[in-house]
Amino acid sequence: MTESTPKPVTIAVPRELKAPAWLERFFPPLASFVLFIAVWQGIILAAQLKPYVLPGPLAVIGAVVDNRSSLGESALFTFQASFVAFLVVMVLGTVIAFVLASSKFIEKAFYPYAVMLQSTPVIAIAPIIIIWFGFGFTSIVTISVIIAIFAVVANTTQGLISVENNLQNLFKLYGATKPQTLLKLRLPFALPFMVTGWRIAAAQVVIGVIVGEYMAGAGGGGMGGLGLIIAETSARLQTAYLFAAALCAALLGIGFFLVVNLFGHLLLKNWHESAIQFEN
Amino acid sequence: MTRTQAFTERSSRSETLVSVRGVDKQYGNGTVAISGIDLEVKTGEFVSLVGPSGCGKSTLLRIIAGLGEATTGEVLVDGAAPGDAQTRGQSSFVFQEATLLPWRPVRQNVELPLELMNVPRIQWAERVGEALHMVGLSNFAGAYPRELSGGMKMRVSIARALVTKPRLLLMDEPFGALDEITRQRLNDDLMRVKEITGATVIFVTHNVFEAVFLSSRIVVMSVRPGRILEQIAVDTPYPRSSDYRTSAAFTKDAGVVMKLLAHTH
């Protein structure tokens, strides 16, 4: 009973990256980066811009160095707030998604309000949150959660309700219990959708914290995070410092996203299309 | 109808495994899928349901599996209602698509029924090994579904159906999406699986040649509403080799079925 003596299937294994491959991968972004810096400096020289309008790349690096302890403390605060907000988004978002996916009625009853919450600008919600929780950590995390949670709720719900019909029939035929169906079918089936939600939320959570700090940040010694530095430096026209804070915020956001991305990749690498390297 | 009578007499010694009496199925939107279906399947038979699309052959199969309920009439599988907890695992269903869990390698896909039915873990390895051996995939236990061809995926699906050692195998156009060469190979292999396991098979297809090659009896259904038009006994004894495909008996029976199908619209 063989299909013309099938040979074992080999999985495409990425070859060891050789020097040309490295170059091929890193040269384009590096080249565009150098070009970007050059254009930046060039514009300042050509248009004779004042440093408080647009500081040069060297001035920004200088501001990072000068304010390194303050930036470090603030970045740590922002990271902590982002981490807590991300945990809340993961747990609360997943729970809400399971509730929404548990019945068509509940989904129809509550999903529109989730969309409505998502569509309301944070600017409108933030003052209420500050009235309730005051300035500081709680308000900042809450604002971030409101911004980021929808991605997890929407994607997880979508994953849970799009389980293939015949797979459900298969489980039914063998008398699977509800917990069995949840753990062995619905959850793994929804996982690629959930990972997508986590990726989006990872980026949004940092943005949410910065926005939260901008509006609800308080306290010295870095206790207002990078968002508060951005708010203060823009008021004082300390533009180079402002750029430095924005740069830190961007790096933090990218780092956060990459970690979550890697985690998702590790979860899916064996089986899901999105995580497999194809060789044509 | 004389053909049906001749068949019933010949097999009257064996016991009835599936009995369908006066079954109608009307969907919520008012569509009558099947109407007045009477069908008896005896242990060891290979019965094919053949008919144009929309004749309700899949609907009938799903009712026998316990995946859908008849609007009226009665279905008994081994004396119990389909889907009854007592008889669980005694009938297996093979879907049109392989319906494998992509996150599980082949072995764990085949283990699934044992897992869900709480079969003691100590028996798994042996039973999965047997099932994979029967479909010729012993060397692929560790492969993921995405690494397999369409034909191999379907073999995994069949192995999964066999792992509970079912008495009744229900197959819903399992080879419909495969190319002709792969389909014929899987037909040959299914023939062998049936010889080894002795399982009774009810097989839905719209391919006349496949039906004639595999079946001991062919049930021809008509469309809107789905009714049984006629039943034809295929007399060539088992085991049937691939030479049977080019024999005169094969051509004759295929001709009879095709002539009937021409009147189903």
Image (cartoon, coloured by chain):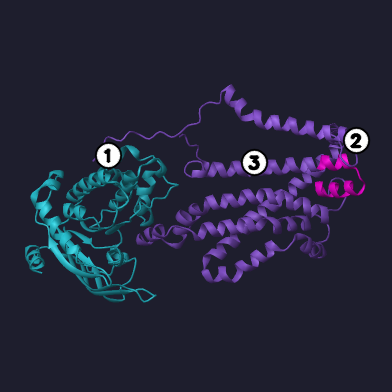
Chain colours: A purple, B cyan
Quarter of the image where one finds residue B51: bottom left
**Mark 3 crowdedness (10 Å alpha carbons): few <14, some 14-19, many ≥20:** some
- As drawn, the label of residue A48 is 2
Q: Is mark 1 on a helix, strand or loop?
A: loop
The location of residue A33, given as percent across then percent down, is: 72, 32
Query: Disc 2 to disc 1, how far (Cα)?
Result: 75 Å
Query: Disc 3 to disc 2, how far (Cα)?
Result: 38 Å
Q: Is residue B163 above or below residue B2?
A: above
Q: On the image, numbered disc 1 is attached to which residue?
A: A3
Drawn side of residue A65 relative to residue A93, left or right: right
Check if mark 2 and mark 1 are on a common chain: yes
Magenta residues, as a range? A224-245
Secondary structure mostly seen in magenta is: helix
Residue A105 magenta: no
Chain letter of the residue carrying label 3: A
Q: On the image, numbered disc 3 is attached to which residue?
A: A258
Mark 2 or mark 1, which is nearer to you? Answer: 2
Quarter of the image where one finds residue B253: bottom left
Mark 3 or mark 2, which is nearer to you? Answer: 2
Residue B146 seen anywhere in this rendered image of the structure: yes
Quarter of the image where one finds residue B70: bottom left
Chain letter of the residue carrying label 2: A
Q: What element carries label 3?
A: helix
Mark 3 or mark 1, which is nearer to you? Answer: 1
Drawn side of residue A96 relative to residue B191, left or right: right
